[in-house]
Image: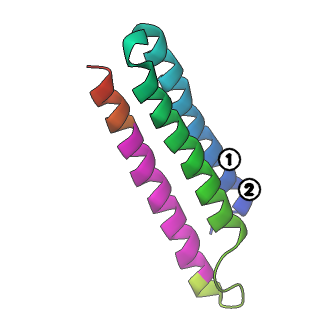
Amino acid sequence: MASIRAIKKDIDCLVGEVISDCYLAIYFHPDKKQDIVSVMEEAVELRNTLFKQVNHPADKQNASLVKKHFAQVRRDLFSKVDALFQKLSGLAK
């Protein structure tokens, strides 16, 4: 099982990449700024939600459930970040 610190770093890194790409998209497509800002807001909301899930696992006593919880958090992170990149890519066309 990865440490909580590593999971939080992954969350910050990936969400930071989404936000960074949003700033670039705003630079190249200023006419779509409002839509791109909404993607940025979703990214920040995702970060906050995932941090809450990491900081407060459901059952701290059962180690196997905690492992499953963190594995699910990682899957959610990758799938939702991918969805945000897809949404941003669609806006940049």
Whole-angstrom CA distance, mark 1 to mark 2, is 6 Å
From the top left corner, tell me how far across and down residue 64 is, in percent.
Answer: 58, 86
Residue 23: in magenta span: no
- Residue 44 in sight here: yes
Q: Judge by depth and name the residue closer to the eye, 27 or 74.
A: 27
Magenta span: 66-84
The residue shown at (55%, 30%) is 19
> Which residue is denoted by mark 1 in the rendering?
9
Please, what secondary structure does the residue beneath circle 2 have?
helix
Q: Quadrant of the C terminus?
A: top left
Residue 79: in magenta span: yes
- Residue 14 in sight here: no
Compared across the picture, whether 57 is left or right of 92 comes to right
Whether label 1 touches label 2, CB < 8 Å: yes
> Which residue is denoted by mark 2 in the rendering?
5
In the figure, 55 relative to 38: above or below? below
Q: Judge by depth and name the residue closer to the eye, 79 or 90.
A: 90
Compared across the picture, whether 88 is left or right of 41 comes to left
The residue shown at (57%, 85%) is 65
Q: Which class describes the residues within 10 Å of circle 1: few (<14), some (14-19), or many (20+)?
A: few
Please, what secondary structure does the residue beneath circle 1 have?
helix
Tell me which corner region of the image, top left, top right, bottom left or bottom right, holds residue 54: bottom right
From the top left corner, tell me how far across and down residue 14 is, in percent.
Answer: 55, 40
Q: Judge by depth and name the residue closer to the eye, 44 or 20.
A: 44
Q: Quadrant of the N terminus?
A: bottom right
Residue type (three-letter) at the residue carrying disc 2: Arg
Residue type (three-letter) at the residue carrying disc 1: Lys
Q: Judge by depth and name the residue closer to the eye, 35 or 15.
A: 35
The residue shown at (71%, 84%) is 60
